Amino acid sequence: MKNAPSGAGWHALGLAHLKLKKPEKAQADFEAALKVAPQHLSSAVELAQLALGRKEPASVLKALEPALAETKALSPPERSRALAVKGAALLLQSRPADAQAGLEEAVRLDPNNVFAKGTLARTYAALKQDEKALPLWKAAVAGEPDNPLWADGQVQSLATLKKPEEALAAATKARAAFPKDEPTALIVARAQELRMPFAPLLTVDEVLASEHLAERGFFVEVEQPGLGAVTLPGPPVRMSETSMTVGPAPALAEHLEAVLSEGLGFEPEEIAFLRRQGIV
């Protein structure tokens, strides 16, 4: 392929790298495909999909410009996919009204495009048109029963339409389908999508098991008298010139005299009297 590069060849290599979960290499392959053959617009759609995964809506829209410029430049299923990806990018920019027409066309072009149906449902819900969103949510859930985004949207629309029994049934079905922590992960993901400062409230065990905090070097191991080595949270901030350390917890009454004298102003004879009386 290096000796006789072609758009189709680079595109096929990019798809192979996607299957191998190597998005950076796939990105380079699709870019090479377009450089060799600008008319190979399927590669532009793949680049847009990669940009959407990185939550870069501006890059999505830019990548799709040539692919969507001519209505017959892509096959109907490919154009449907491109329009759905564009709609999702517009939702990331909080522009549901701009996304609506393209997503409706995407569903018309390919009635089997589950992503287009789910994204159009999200658009209708954002525009407070839950009655129109509901059948699309149901179709998306049926097509991708393991996608929590569709399940959550269906429950939300049912609740908005004041259909509590159906909402409860859908929520019960969703809870059975996903791990118990899936709702938390979904809420955090949706909040981050809207650029809201959300984070899960973790238990002590969940904090200690956090791979992210461990990778950041947040935890420190301290030798605690009587207990041995224990894992503790490290300093909450790291400063360029002032070092912060974490030491063992004080033993019972270890700092009693300092507290009494320096903190409370007791004289040495007063502290001695308290000791003789067994008060401290």
Image: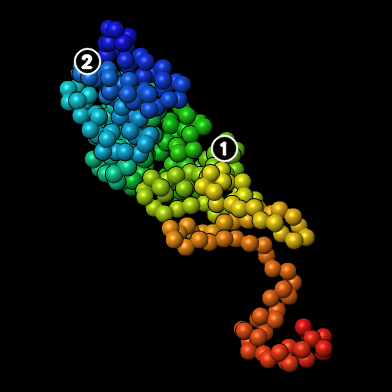
Residue for point 34% across, 34% down? 52
Residue 240 in percent (x, y) is at 43, 58
Tag 2 or tag 1, which sits nearer the N-term? 2
In whole angstroms, how far apart are the C-alphas of marks 1 and 2? Answer: 43 Å
Query: Coloured how?
Result: rainbow
Label 1: which secondary element: loop
Label at residue 232: none
* Relative to 227, 166 lies left or right: left
* Relative to 39, 13 lies left or right: right
Q: Which quarter of the image is occupied by the N terminus?
A: top left
Q: Residues within 10 Å of mark 2 (few under 14, many from 20)?
A: some
In the image, 204 versus 274, the foreground residue is 274
Q: Which residue is mark 2?
A: 37
Q: Nearer the viewer, mark 1 or mark 2?
A: 2
Q: Which quarter of the image is occupied by the C terminus?
A: bottom right
Q: In the current view of this chain or complex, which residue is farthest to the left?
A: 70
Q: Which residue is mark 1?
A: 178
In the image, 257 versus 193, the foreground residue is 257
Determine the image quadrant of residue 135.
top left
Residue 175 in percent (x, y) is at 57, 41
Which amino acid, mark 1?
A: Phe
Residue 91 in percent (x, y) is at 31, 41
Residue 79, above or below 252? above
Figure label count: 2
